[in-house]
Image (cartoon, rainbow, N blue to C red):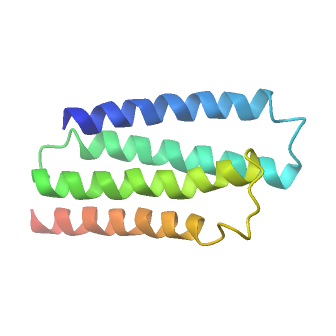
């Protein structure tokens, strides 16, 4: 649990740094659509940081359930938000990594479903 919370804290800090970077440094450099995409990546990262804080402090989850949900969300952040950052800031051609963003979104969905089923077990 300590490792998950440590990773979560780093992801939360990065979301704040990336959000500030987007609001100040990228505002003039990115087009409106790219900036909206970038902000969506930051927003979804922060949403899942809050979810991870809950998952890793809620005593109702088993250790296995906590680990499963955490890793689904960690990988979802990496793939979903990370691919958006790579496209908008890194200049990666979206055609090269088109499948990564929806795969990250799918991991988020699966993580929420696993959480749902963990609640049903209670």
Residue at 39 percent across and 50 percent down: it is: 74
> Measuring 61% from the left and 56% from the top, which residue is drawn there?
83
Q: Residue 62: image x %, image y %?
A: 10, 53
Does 35 sit left or right of 121 as displayed? right
Q: Is residue 98 left or right of residue 69?
A: right
Is 115 in front, or is 69? 69
Where 37 sits versus 7, above or below? below
At horizontal 46% and vertical 33% (from top left) the residue drawn is 12
Q: Is residue 45 left or right of residue 97?
A: left
Count of marks, rendered view: 0
Q: Is residue 36 above or below residue 119?
A: above
Occupied quadrant, residue 59? top left
Measured as percent of width and height from the top left, residue 15 is found at: 55, 35
Image spot of residue 32 (x, y percent)? 87, 50
Check the picture and name the quadrant holding the C terminus.
Answer: bottom left
Image quadrant in which you'd find residue 16: top right
Quarter of the N terminus within the rendering: top left
């Amino acid at each position: 649990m300590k490792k998950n919370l440590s990773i979560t804290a780093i992801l939360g800090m990065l979301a704040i740094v990336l959000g500030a970077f987007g609001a100040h440094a990228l505002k003039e450099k990115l087009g409106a659509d790219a900036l909206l995409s970038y902000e969506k990546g930051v927003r979804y990262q922060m949403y899942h940081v809050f979810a991870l804080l809950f998952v890793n402090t809620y005593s109702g989850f088993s250790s296995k359930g906590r680990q499963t949900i955490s890793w689904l969300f960690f990988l979802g952040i990496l793939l979903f938000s990370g691919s958006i950052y790579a496209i908008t800031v890194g200049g990666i051609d979206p055609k090269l990594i088109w499948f990564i963003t929806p795969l990250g979104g799918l991991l988020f969905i699966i993580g929420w479903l696993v959480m749902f089923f963990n609640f049903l077990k209670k």
